[in-house]
Amino acid sequence: MNSSTKQIIAVAGCKGGVGKTLVAVNLALALTNNGRRVVLMDGNLAVPDVGISLGLEKKLDMTHFDASDSFSSFIQDGPQGLKVLSPKGEPIWRETVETGHAVRMIESLESLAPTLDTLVIDTAPGLAPDNVALIQAAGEILIVINQEVVSLLDAVRMIRMLYRIYGVRRFGVIVNAVSNRRYGSNQFERLQSYLSDEVEIILRYLGAIPFDKAVAESLTRQQALLQVNPDCRASKAISRIAHQIMAIPVTPPRGRIEFFLPTRIKERV
């Protein structure tokens, strides 16, 4: 991939607790280890936790930024050269997060375009308008589910909404915390069957991440799994998924609200 071409990846899942942050953090680190200039962004505007999961000490509040703010002040140094766009500290409670706030974030990130090849966004659970605005602004949308039926049904709802309202047709699917690899492919097949009536939706199975005790250890130590135990089964699965994502052709601009749209249009021309 041309180093000046932007790949924007939203890690999403309608249900909380499926492992989106685990996937986003370690996928970003795996891409960094493969030579990408990666920024990992915490897209949970109400309760950000990427910085907490990585043990970053700097406390920042992104809830009151202005479109004129310099986002370089929000960038923190993560492990192994990864850059992290995330506040740390106590969750900031707000009754609502406006869609306009998410749109201003998308537009204000344009200044970061020369410094990265890949943006990985750890999105919030649910279908709140601000969250959906962030997800649809990405070029690649990765849906994370687990073995629970609820996570499967919630993923169906999210995919249908993104398709019917925003016209998003392509989705990558990752099944997390599986007891065996076969269960991951079975869960993907169930997802396909639920969406069989939406003939234009394209689902791509990127793989399954096995249940691994090393995950709990990494959370306790507030470090990425690929730092704590790069040779465990879950780490190796995430690394395989990262290689698949690197092989996906970068999605061209679609002309709606998107990350780095002016820069990507110039690159395309």
Image: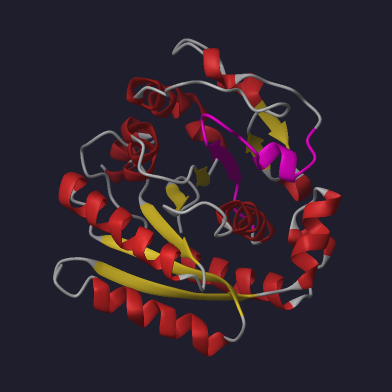
Q: Is residue 158 magenta?
A: no
Question: In this rendering, does residue 248 appear at all?
Answer: no
Q: Nearer the viewer, residue 106 or 178?
A: 178
Q: Determine the residue positioned at 53% across, 12% down.
A: 64
Q: Answer with the quarter of the image where residue 131 lies.
A: top left
Query: Along the line of sight, which residue is nearer the eye, 224 or 267?
Result: 224
**Residue 148 located left or right of residue 35:** left
Which quarter of the image is occupied by the C terminus? top left
Residue 142 x, y percent position in the rendering: 43, 59
Read off the magenta span. Answer: 35-56
Q: Residue at x 37, y 60 (%)?
A: 155
- Please say if 190 is above or below 7: below
**Toward which corner of the image does residue 268 lie, by quadrant?**
top left
Say left or right for 162 vs 150: left
Q: Is residue 23 above or below residue 92?
A: below
User: Which residue shows up at 28% across the image and 33% down it?
Assistant: 257
Q: Is residue 113 left or right of residue 266?
A: right
Residue 57: image location, x then y, percent: 81, 30
Q: Position of residue 59 (x, y in %)?
A: 74, 22
In the image, what residue occupies the spot 22% across and 44% down?
254
